[in-house]
Image (cartoon, rainbow, N blue to C red):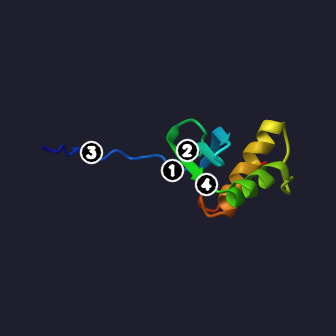
């Protein structure tokens, strides 16, 4: 099959912000999160990624514990706090690159 070369490369905006779009917790036990990656101006959704927390009672319980416990610096509504805690857990487990959690 042939390929196609662009005459001018497409430049991509920098990945600057992660937001939890969907959170799935089921009885398997399993946890999956759909994360939206945005640019620094929060105007462009660059990509959507799904992160599956490894199955098993210990890892899922670890996530549930993180979701239920207050993290330093969190503010806002319950949804905002859940987003903050979920992303914090992913960073702590090296499932997302390090960064600053914004409350």
Provide residue 11's location: percent of width, then percent of height: 38, 47
Please, what secondary structure does the residue beneath circle 1 have?
A: loop
User: Of 26 and 6, which appears nearest the observer?
Assistant: 26
Q: Secondary structure at mark 3?
A: loop
Which residue is located at x 53 percent, y 37 percent?
44
Number of the label disc, if any, that sits on residue 39: 2
Quarter-of-image position of residue 90: bottom right
Q: Nearer the viewer, mark 2 or mark 3?
A: 2
Q: How far apart in space, not on screen, are marks 1 and 4 (Cα)?
A: 31 Å
Disc 1 vs disc 2: Cβ atoms closer than 8 Å? yes
Q: Secondary structure at mark 2?
A: loop
Sequence-first disc among 4 and 2: 2
Dot 2: within a 10 Å radius of its alpha carbon, few (fewer than 14), some, or many (20 or more) residues? some
First-in-chain label (1 vs 4): 1
Q: Nearer the viewer, mark 4 or mark 2?
A: 4
Rendered residue at 71%/60% (across/down): 58
Please give the residue where the numbered disc 4 appears in the rendered image. Answer: 55
Residue at mark 1? 14
**Would you say 24 lies left or right of 70 here?**
left
Quadrant containing the N terminus is: top left
- Read off the residue under disc 3: 8
Which callout, 1 or 3, points at the residue further toward the start of the chain? 3
Which of the two discs, 3 and 4, labels the residue nearer the N terminus?
3
Drawn side of residue 11 relative to residue 67, left or right? left
Cα separation, mark 1 vs mark 2, equals 6 Å
- Across and down, in percent, residue 8 comes to 26, 45
Marks 1 & 3, CB-CB < 8 Å contact: no
Packing grade of label 1 (10 A; few <14, some 14-19, many >=20) is: few
Camera-nearest label, 1 or 3: 1
Per the model, the C-alpha gap separating discs 2 and 3 is 21 Å
Image quadrant assignment for residue 50: top right
């Amino acid at each position: 099959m042939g390929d196609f070369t662009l005459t001018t490369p497409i430049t991509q905006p920098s990945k600057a912000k992660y937001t939890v779009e969907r959170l799935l917790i089921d009885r398997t036990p399993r946890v999956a999160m759909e994360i939206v990656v945005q640019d620094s101006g929060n105007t462009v959704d660059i990509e959507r990624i799904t992160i599956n927390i490894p199955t098993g009672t210990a890892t899922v319980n670890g996530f549930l514990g993180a979701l239920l416990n207050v993290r330093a610096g969190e503010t806002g509504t319950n949804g905002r706090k859940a987003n903050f805690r979920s992303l914090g857990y992913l960073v702590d487990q090296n499932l997302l690159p390090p960064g600053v959690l914004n409350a």
